[in-house]
Amino acid sequence: MFNKPKNCVTARRDELKPTVMDYFPEEWRDKLHPVGRLDLDTEGLLIITDDGRLDNRLMQPRRHVEKKYFFRALGHIDDEKARALESGIELYHKDYVASPAKFELVGYSRVRDNLELIPDRHRSKWMKNPDGDVTAGFLTITEGKKHQVKLMVKSVGCRVFTLERVRVGGLELDKTLKPGEWRELTESELALLCGGEYPDKSNIQN
C-alpha cells in the first residue's frame, strides 16, 4: 500500500519527472510495478506489487472493482448534477458514456477558503471571484478511463482541483501513511482488496 504524493509519475521510470518507484529501494524497482495509474497531480492509494494475478484481478473491466476518490471542485454540484453523475454521464469532449457512479456530498465552501489548495496556474484567475462555489465530495467509479473523475465532474460544469483515491475494492487507504510512505499489506487486507478471493501466497507464481 503506497500513499502516492502529487507531482510524481505512476511509472517505473521517467526521464523528466520523479516516479512512484523512486520511493522504494532501488533493487525493488525492476521487480515491482504499480497497479493502474494515478495522474501526476492525483494522490492517494496505489497498490505496488510483483503479483501479476493480483494486477489482473484488480484491472479487469469485467470485475467492476470500485475505486473511491475524494475531490474538491470549482463549482456547485446540486442534486440534478449528482443524479447525472450517478446515472452515467458522457465524458467531457469524449465520445464515451461512463458507467453509473456513486456520489457523496461532503459539503460546500468558497474559493477564498481553499486558496492554499488551488494550483498556482489557476489561483489568480479564480481569486477574481473569491465567493465562487467549491464542492467537496466522494465519487466512486468502477472503470479506469484516463482522467475519468476529472472529466465526469467537468461534464456537469465543475472543475476538479484536488483529487485523492481513498479506496480500491474493499481496501481503504491507511491514513497513518503520509504521502510518499508505504507498507506491506496484511493477509486480511489482501482479502479485502480482492473481495475475499485472494489465494494463499504459497500458491502464487509471480
Image (spheres, rainbow, N blue to C red):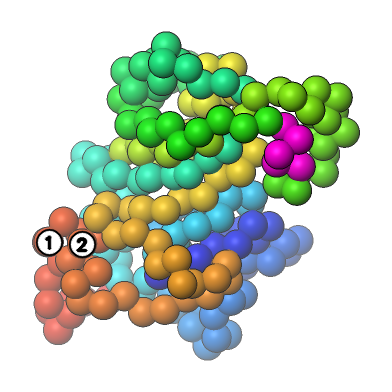
The residue shown at (24%, 69%) is 189
Residue plotted at (36% across, 46% down): 67
As drawn, 179 above or below 162 = below
Q: How far from the left and from the top, in percent, is residue 140?
A: 36, 38
Callout 1: SS:
loop
Residue to which mark 1 is pinned = 196
Left or right: where 31 falls relative to 153: left
Using the rendered image of the protein, determine whether residue 77 is visible from the camera's viewpoint: yes
Question: Is 143 in the magenta?
Answer: no
| Image quadrant in which the C terminus is located | bottom left
Q: Is residue 112 magenta?
A: yes
Q: Residue at x 35, y 37 (%)?
A: 141
Who is closer to the viewer here, 151 or 62?
151
Tell which of 132 and 156 is nearer to you. 132
Q: Is residue 164 above or below residue 33?
A: above
Q: Secondary structure at mark 2?
A: helix
Instruction: Return the x and y of residue 107 as percentages of the image width and height.
Output: 50, 33
Helix, strand or loop for the magenta stretch, by majority: helix
Q: Are marks 1 and 2 in contact (CB under 8 Å)?
A: yes
Magenta highlight range: 111-115
Residue where numbered disc 2 is placed: 192
Left or right of residue 159, residue 167 in this image: left
Q: Residues within 10 Å of mark 1 (few under 14, many from 20)?
A: few
- Quadrant of the frame with the N terminus: bottom left
Q: Residues within 10 Å of mark 2 (few under 14, many from 20)?
A: some
